[in-house]
Image: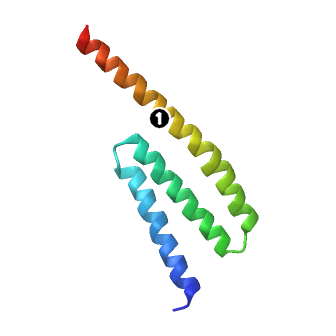
C-alpha cells in the first residue's frame, strides 16, 4: 500500500463518517460541525487530485462562508427558542 492510497482511504472514511453523522445526529449545532468536517475532507480529496484551487475555493466558500452562516443561524435560533421556553414557564 502506498501512502497515497492510505491517505485516500483515511479521508474517504472521514467523509463517509461525517456525512453519516450529519444524517444521524439530532443536535443541529453538531450537525453543522459534522457538515464542516465533511466539506474539509472533500477539500482534502481535491488536494490529492492536484486541484489545489478547487480545494481552496471549497474551504473559503463553503467552510468559511456557508458554514459560519449556518452556525450563527443555529446559535441565534437556539437562544431564541430557549428564551421562549423560559417565558412560557414563568408566565
SS at mark 1 in the image: helix
Asked if residue 59 lies left or right of residue 35, the reply is: right
Q: Residues within 10 Å of mark 1 (few under 14, many from 20)?
A: some
Spot occupied by residue 39 in the image (x, y as percentages of width and height): 56, 57
Residue 56 in the image: x percent, y percent? 71, 60
70 w.r.t. 5: above or below: above
Q: Residue at x 35, y 18 (%)?
A: 84
Is 47 drawn above or below residue 24 in the view shown? below
Give the residue displayed 39% in from the left and 51% down from the top.
23
The residue located at (51%, 58%) in the rendering is 38
Measuring from the top left, give residue 24's x and y in whole percent. Answer: 35, 51
Residue with the most extreme right position: 53
Instruction: Check disc 1 and report the residue beneath it.
Output: 74
Please indicate whether residue 43 sits to the left or right of residue 20 in the image: right
Q: Between 8 and 87, which is closer to the camera in this rendering?
A: 87
Q: Residue furthest top?
A: 91
Q: Residue at x 47, y 35 (%)?
A: 74
- Describe the colour scheme in one phrase: rainbow
Quadrant of the frame with the C terminus:
top left
Query: On the picture, is 86 further left or further right than 80?
Result: left
Residue 86 quadrant: top left
Amino acid at each position: 500500500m502506498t501512502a497515497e492510497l492510505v491517505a485516500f482511504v483515511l479521508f474517504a472514511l472521514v467523509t463517509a463518517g461525517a456525512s453519516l453523522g450529519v444524517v444521524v445526529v439530532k443536535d443541529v449545532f453538531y450537525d453543522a460541525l459534522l457538515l464542516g468536517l465533511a466539506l474539509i475532507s472533500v477539500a482534502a480529496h481535491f488536494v490529492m487530485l492536484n486541484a489545489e484551487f478547487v480545494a481552496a475555493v471549497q474551504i473559503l466558500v463553503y467552510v468559511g462562508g456557508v458554514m459560519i452562516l449556518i452556525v450563527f443561524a443555529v446559535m441565534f435560533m437556539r437562544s431564541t427558542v430557549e428564551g421562549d421556553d423560559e417565558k412560557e414557564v414563568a408566565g
